[in-house]
């Protein structure tokens, strides 16, 4: 008996099923590949299956623009607010083209471009090789990138524009501008600098550029903004400090606004302190410090945490919502244990001095009073002497070169506040800061100057602890202000 021959219809069904299964497998694999490549498409055009209106060419080639026959028009682009914003930036870019800072041939980048209105304004003015970056992508005008690293090669752009957000990281932002902007290229920023201090702080962030011009103008919502045009130079400016630094006009302006120094010696300095506290004009209450790289508070002679860091700086000093790095410099071992539990405070268990050397810590107190942790006597730093010349109330400690430490830790881009209470050592430390140029790194000092003041306990008698006079202290304060530092008298 012959085996049955399959019907042609049955063979067709088998073939159709096999073909359908094969197509399904290929479709799934293609979908996975497109999904994985879609994210990389923004950075490497070779991985793209489909292209939006704008794409970036990889491998260091020039920025390119590709236009599809039927460009996608997001719903946002049809709103009146969007059109009004595009028109505003279009007028800005027309002026920049007329002044020669921008041309249709420019490769242009908009940083923190938000929804891409400024990018579209560039394209409508003929600058077709333009793209924007922001933390949130908005295709096809904006790719996603952080301020810390933009997805472009060095020297990729002839023109960069930004509406800088002061709440971000301006220092990291400036480094990326310097990296991606071509030598000779222009960077234009709209910032809300309200004063000369903030304006110059912004300029100092860009060591690669020189200022071409600036102008005040109405912003998009009529809020005043300052437009800054900078040009990238071939040679980077050196940020190294010499032994001398000039005092710029904007710092002199701040000092002129400060409270006046008390020229007459107070009969009751403890009363003068309370009065003076009400008159102090903090730098952060007079100027915008948003455009700084870091914010530091250095307490020299900090004693315990509650002495000034916790009781005054944390509670009273106006910080403009900035987080400060706090350094406590305190050589007295009595207070070291407390700082182990204080988060956000770095303890330097040494004595601030003019060089690195061994010192001796003199504990001074009223005769007959026992020294205990809760009633620790005041202390003075003394240079090395023969050990036989010391009594029992002296501790051996290590001193460090405060001026050199400061120069190694902070830069001119940082905002630095110093409080100094060093029981007479200020007459050594301040001259060294000025001579070394480290004083230029300090923006504001709260200085307690120690002199032979009138004693609270004994009317008509001066303290025998210190030999300096009030007039010598006044001379020290005056010299600091002449050096461009906003110094306050502290008791």
Image (cartoon, rainbow, N blue to C red):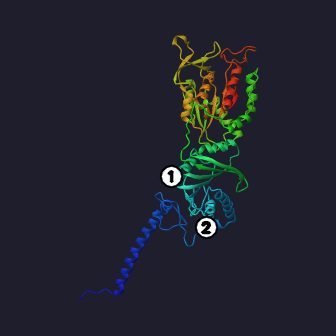
Q: Which image quarter holds the C terminus?
A: top right
Q: Which residue is tagged 1?
A: 154
The image position of residue 387, as x and y in percent, is 51, 13
The x, y position of residue 199, in whole percent, is: 66, 44
Q: Do the residues labelled 1 and 2 touch (CB within 8 Å)?
A: no
Q: Mark 2 points at which residue?
A: 74
| Relative to 446, residue 52 above or below | below
Give coordinates of residue 293: x percent, y percent. 59, 42
* Nearer to us in this view, 349 or 288: 288
- Residue 341 showing in the rendered view: no
Give the residue at x 64% y 66%: 77
The image quadrant of residue 145 is bottom right
Q: What element carries label 2?
A: loop
Instruction: Please name whichever residue, 348 or 163, is drawn nearer the observer in this view of the structure.
Output: 163
Q: Marks 1/2: CA distance?
A: 32 Å
Seen at 63% across and 45% down, the residue is 202
Name the mark nearer the viewer: 1 or 2.
Answer: 1
Q: Earlier in the sequence, mark 1 or mark 2?
A: 2
Name the residue at the top extreme.
388
Q: Determine crowd level at label 2: few under 14, some 14-19, many 20+ residues with C-alpha closer than 10 A.
A: few
- 328 or 28, which lies in front? 328
Identify the element where label 1 is drawn: loop
Q: In this view, does 459 lie to the left or right of 247?
A: right
């Amino acid at each position: 008996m012959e085996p049955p021959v399959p019907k042609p219809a049955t063979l067709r069904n088998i073939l159709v099923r096999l073909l359908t299964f094969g197509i399904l497998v290929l479709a799934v694999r293609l979908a996975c590949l497109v999904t994985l490549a879609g994210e990389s498409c923004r950075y490497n055009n070779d991985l793209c299956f489909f292209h939006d209106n704008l794409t970036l060419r990889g491998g260091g080639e020039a920025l390119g623009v590709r236009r599809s026959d039927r460009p996608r028009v997001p719903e946002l682009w049809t709103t009146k607010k969007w059109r009004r914003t595009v028109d505003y930036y279009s007028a800005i870019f027309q002026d920049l083209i007329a002044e020669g800072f921008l041309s249709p041939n420019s490769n242009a980048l908009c940083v923190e471009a938000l929804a891409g209105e400024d990018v579209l304004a560039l394209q409508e003015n003929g600058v077709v090789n333009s793209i924007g970056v922001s933390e949130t992508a908005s295709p096809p005008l904006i790719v996603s990138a952080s301020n810390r690293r933009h997805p472009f090669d060095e020297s990729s752009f002839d023109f960069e524009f930004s509406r800088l957000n002061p709440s971000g990281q301006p220092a990291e932002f400036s480094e990326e501008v310097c990296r991606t902007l071509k030598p000779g290229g222009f960077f234009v920023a709209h910032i809300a600098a309200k004063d000369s201090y903030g304006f110059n702080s912004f300029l100092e962030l860009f060591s690669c550029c020189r200022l071409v011009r600036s102008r005040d103008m109405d912003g998009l919502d009529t809020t005043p903004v300052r437009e800054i045009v900078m040009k990238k130079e071939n040679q980077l400016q050196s940020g190294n400090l010499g032994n001398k630094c000039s005092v710029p006009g904007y710092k002199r302006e701040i000092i002129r606004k400060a409270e006046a120094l008390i020229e007459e010696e107070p009969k009751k300095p403890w009363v003068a302190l309370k009065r003076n506290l009400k008159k102090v004009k903090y730098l952060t209450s007079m100027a915008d410090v948003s455009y700084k790289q870091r914010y530091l508070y250095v307490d020299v002679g900090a004693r315990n945490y509650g002495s000034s860091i916790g009781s005054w700086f944390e509670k009273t000093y106006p910080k403009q919502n900035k987080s400060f790095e706090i350094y406590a410099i305190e050589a007295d071992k009595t207070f070291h244990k407390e700082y182990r539990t204080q988060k956000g405070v770095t303890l330097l268990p040494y004595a601030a001095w003019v060089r690195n050397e061994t010192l001796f810590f003199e504990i001074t107190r009223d005769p007959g009073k026992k020294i205990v942790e809760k009633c620790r006597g005041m202390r003075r730093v003394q240079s090395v002497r023969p050990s036989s010349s010391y009594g029992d109330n002296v501790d051996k400690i290590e001193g460090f070169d405060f001026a050199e430490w400061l120069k190694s830790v902070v830069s001119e881009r940082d905002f630095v506040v110093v409080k100094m209470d060093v029981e007479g050592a200020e007459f050594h430390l301040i001259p060294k800061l000025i001579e070394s140029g480290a004083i230029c790194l300090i923006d504001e000092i709260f200085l307690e100057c120690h002199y032979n003041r009138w004693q609270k306990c004994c009317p008509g008698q001066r303290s025998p602890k210190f030999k300096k006079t009030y007039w010598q202290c006044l001379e020290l304060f005056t010299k600091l202000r002449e050096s461009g530092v906003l110094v306050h008298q502290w008791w």
